[in-house]
Image (tube, helix red, strand yellow):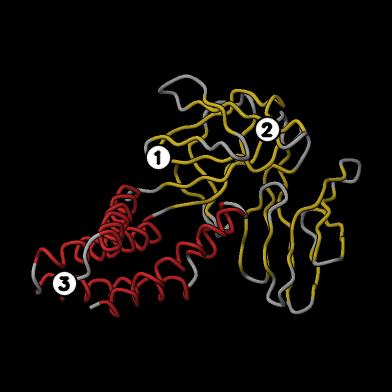
């Protein structure tokens, strides 16, 4: 029983440490790591092992195995919540202009699909009253139409009704609002300075706009190229075609958005796991 318990709890702690380390580097890194195949397979294996341990604990004397049962049922529920959130969570990006009215859709993380927002959101204003270390940092004020304005910064997301909005970067008037881009036969929609991974492993992103010639600067790996709408470029084995480019007219900001439904299951499950683990450490060892 103790061996099964350790085989499930120790990998769970390792998974939690990996997720915590990824969260330090930002929401995009966390979503990429926790949504990867190896992380999901490992979490599923730990959840299955925890469920087996909980079943075995339920078959022994209740008094001596109660904490083991609680810890492993909580671990199973927590990991099930993590998996369900990965399947049900929708995340992406949103570029809002100040005083431009409410926005009703956002760009999916794949940069290929525009999805509806569960609630309209608008940018009321953006200032630099927030602090980031010793430097002034942008502070955006968002409203959902149901209450007043809420502050959103690099480390201060707006959470409302299962939705989360996090400020990524401000944009000035005249910067590319939307860039229609085609890589071979795959169409993408880029917001300001977003990255697309090419087949050869290089990153491509919109760099800057030259208004006098209506050209967009695209960074392809370490190379900077200029393209106008309708131009094509051959980069390695990839054909890049630039479509329409729409510019911002007002100051604005790019936000990362997430919509989750089962966060409560994650917190409840891992809370039970911690309670059961504390009881296992402080209580008497099972026979």
Residue farthest toward the top in the current orientation of the protein: 148
Quadrant that contains the N terminus: bottom left
Which numbered disc, 3 or 2, marks the residue that appears first in the sequence? 3
Closest to the observer, 239 or 257 = 257
Give the number of the disc on residue 185. none
List the residue tagged with mark 3: 57
Position of 126 with respect to 256 (left or right) is right
| Up/down of 138 relative to 125, above or below | below
In the rendered structure, the answer to whether residue 287 lies left or right of residue 85 reads: left
Q: Could you give the CA–CA distance between mark 2 and mark 1, rounded to whole angstroms? A: 21 Å
Regarding mark 1 in the picture, which secondary structure is present there? strand
Quarter-of-image position of residue 142? top right
Q: CA distance from mark 1 to mark 3?
A: 42 Å
In the image, 35 versus 182, the foreground residue is 35
Tag shown at residue 252:
2
Q: List the residue tagged with mark 1.
A: 118
Q: Earlier in the sequence, mark 2 or mark 1?
A: 1
Q: Nearer the viewer, residue 74 or 212?
A: 74
Image position, residue 136 (x, y; %): 75, 30
* Neighbour tally class for label 1: few under 14, some 14-19, many 20 plus, Cα within 10 Å: few
Q: At x 52% / y 53%, what residue is drawn?
A: 108
Secondary structure of the residue carrying numbered label 2? strand
- Secondary structure category for the residue under label 3: helix
Q: Is residue 125 above or below residue 108?
A: above
């Amino acid at each position: 029983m103790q061996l099964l318990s350790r085989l499930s709890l120790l990998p769970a702690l390792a998974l939690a440490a990996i997720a915590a380390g990824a969260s330090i580097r930002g929401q995009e890194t966390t979503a990429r790591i926790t949504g990867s195949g190896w992380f999901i397979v490992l979490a599923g294996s730990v959840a299955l092992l925890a469920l087996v341990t909980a079943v075995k604990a339920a078959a022994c004397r209740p008094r001596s195995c109660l904490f083991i049962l609680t810890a492993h049922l909580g671990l199973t529920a927590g990991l099930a919540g993590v998996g369900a959130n990965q399947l049900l969570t929708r995340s992406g990006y949103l570029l809002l202009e100040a005083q431009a009215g409410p926005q009703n859709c956002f760009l999916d993380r794949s940069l290929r699909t525009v999805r509806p927002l569960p609630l309209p959101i608008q940018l009321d204003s953006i200032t630099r009253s927030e602090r980031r270390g010793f430097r002034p940092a942008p502070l955006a004020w968002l409203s959902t139409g149901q209450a007043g304005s809420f502050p959103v910064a690099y480390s201060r997301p707006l959470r409302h009704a299962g939705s989360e909005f996090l400020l990524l970067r401000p944009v000035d008037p005249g910067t590319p609002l939307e860039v229609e881009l085609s890589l071979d036969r795959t169409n993408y929609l880029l917001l300001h300075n977003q990255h697309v991974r090419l087949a050869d492993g290089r990153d491509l992103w919109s760099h800057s706009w030259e208004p006098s010639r209506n050209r967009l600067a695209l960074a392809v790996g370490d190379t900077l190229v200029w393209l106008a709408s309708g131009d094509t470029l051959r980069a390695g084995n990839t054909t890049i075609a630039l479509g329409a480019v729409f510019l911002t007219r007002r100051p604005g900001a790019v936000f990362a958005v997430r919509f989750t439904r089962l966060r409560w299951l994650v917190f409840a499950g891992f809370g039970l796991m911690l309670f059961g683990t504390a009881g296992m450490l402080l209580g008497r060892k099972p026979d």
